Image (tube, rainbow, N blue to C red):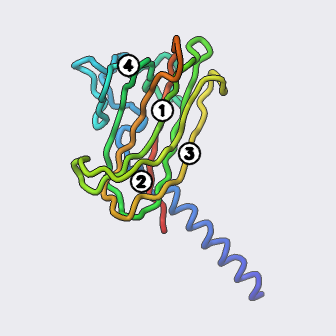
C-alpha cells in the first residue's frame, strides 16, 4: 500500500510540475501578430501596427494573411528581404534564468526560399536600454529544402547569462548566396521562463 501511495504521489508531483511549466506566461506580447491594422501591410508602411514589435534594417517583410497562420490564426509575418530586415521585441529576464523559445515557420512551395535564410535568436543585455550587449543565443535557422506548405515548429531552451536583465528576440532574413528568392512565414512565437 505504501508503494502505491508513493507512486501516486510521485505521479502527482510530476503532473503538477509539467502543468506549472505549461502555464508559464509568454514573455512576448503579440507573438501571434494578431494585433494589426487589418490589412496586408509592408513593414515600412506608416499605418502598420505590430506593437510592441519593432522593425530595423530594410523593409523586407510584411504582415500578411496569404495563408492561414499556425493553428488557424489569421495573421503571421512574412520575411522576404534579400538584404537584412530585423523584427525585434525586448523582454525582462532573470539573471541566469532558463528560457524556452518556440514558434512556427512556413515555406510555401509557390514561394520557396532559395539562397537565403530566416533566423531567430536572443540577444542578452545587462541594461534595459539595449546598450550593454553581453552575448547571443541561436534559436532557429530556417532554410529552403525542408517541409513545404505546412507550419513547422521550432523550439530551443537557452540560459540567460548571469548578468543579463533584458533579452531581445530577433527574427531576421538574409541572403546566403547569389540570386536569392522566396519568403518565409513566422507565427505564434513564445518565450517562457522555466523553473530552476
Residue 162 drawn above or below residue 55: below
Q: Nearer the viewer, mark 4 or mark 2?
A: 4
Instruction: Of the two numbered discs 3 and 2 on the same chain, state the one appearing first in sequence.
Output: 2
Residue 25 is marked as 2
What kind of element bears circle 4?
loop
What kind of element bears circle 1?
strand
- Residue 84 screen position, x and y as percent: 39, 25
Furthest-front residue in this view: 178
Query: Mark 4 packing: few (<14 Cα in 10 Å), some, or many (20+)?
Result: many
| Quadrant in the rendering for residue 70 | top right
Q: Nearer the viewer, mark 3 or mark 4?
A: 4
Instruction: Of the two numbered discs 1 and 2 on the same chain, state the one appearing first in sequence.
Output: 2
Q: CA distance from mark 4 to mark 2?
A: 30 Å
Mark 3–mark 2 contact, CB under 8 Å?
no
The residue at which mark 3 appears reads as: 155
The residue at which mark 4 appears reads as: 60
Residue 63 located left or right of residue 188: left
Q: CA distance from mark 4 to mark 1?
A: 17 Å
Instruction: Of the two numbered discs 4 and 1 on the same chain, state the one appearing first in sequence.
Output: 4
Mark 1–mark 2 contact, CB under 8 Å?
no
Residue 105 drawn above or below residue 132: above
The residue at which mark 1 appears reads as: 187
Query: Mark 2 packing: few (<14 Cα in 10 Å), some, or many (20+)?
Result: few
Viewer-closest of 139 and 74: 139
Q: CA distance from mark 1 to mark 2?
A: 17 Å
Viewer-closest of 159 and 135: 135
- Residue 113 screen position, x and y as percent: 56, 19
- Residue 174 screen position, x and y as percent: 45, 25
What kind of element bears circle 2?
loop
Query: Mark 3 packing: few (<14 Cα in 10 Å), some, or many (20+)?
Result: some
Q: CA distance from mark 1 to mark 3?
A: 13 Å
Residue 164 drawn above or below residue 47: below
Amino acid at each position: 500500500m505504501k508503494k502505491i501511495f508513493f507512486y501516486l504521489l510521485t505521479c502527482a508531483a510530476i503532473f503538477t510540475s509539467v502543468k506549472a511549466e505549461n502555464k508559464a506566461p509568454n514573455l512576448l506580447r503579440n507573438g501571434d501578430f494578431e494585433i494589426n491594422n487589418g490589412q496586408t501591410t509592408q513593414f515600412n508602411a506608416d499605418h502598420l501596427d505590430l506593437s510592441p514589435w519593432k522593425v530595423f534594417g530594410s523593409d523586407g517583410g510584411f504582415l500578411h494573411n496569404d495563408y492561414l497562420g499556425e493553428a488557424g490564426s489569421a495573421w503571421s509575418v512574412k520575411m522576404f528581404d534579400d538584404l537584412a530586415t530585423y523584427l525585434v521585441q525586448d523582454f525582462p529576464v532573470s539573471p541566469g534564468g532558463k528560457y524556452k523559445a518556440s514558434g512556427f515557420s512556413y515555406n510555401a512551395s509557390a514561394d520557396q526560399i532559395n539562397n537565403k535564410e530566416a533566423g531567430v535568436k536572443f540577444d542578452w543585455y545587462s541594461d534595459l536600454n539595449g546598450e550593454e550587449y553581453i552575448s547571443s543565443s541561436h534559436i532557429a535557422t530556417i532554410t529552403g529544402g525542408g517541409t513545404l506548405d505546412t507550419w513547422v515548429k521550432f523550439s530551443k531552451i537557452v540560459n540567460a547569462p548571469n548578468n543579463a536583465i533584458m533579452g531581445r528576440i530577433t527574427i531576421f532574413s538574409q541572403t546566403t548566396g547569389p540570386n536569392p528568392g522566396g519568403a518565409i512565414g513566422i507565427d505564434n512565437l513564445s518565450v517562457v521562463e522555466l523553473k530552476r
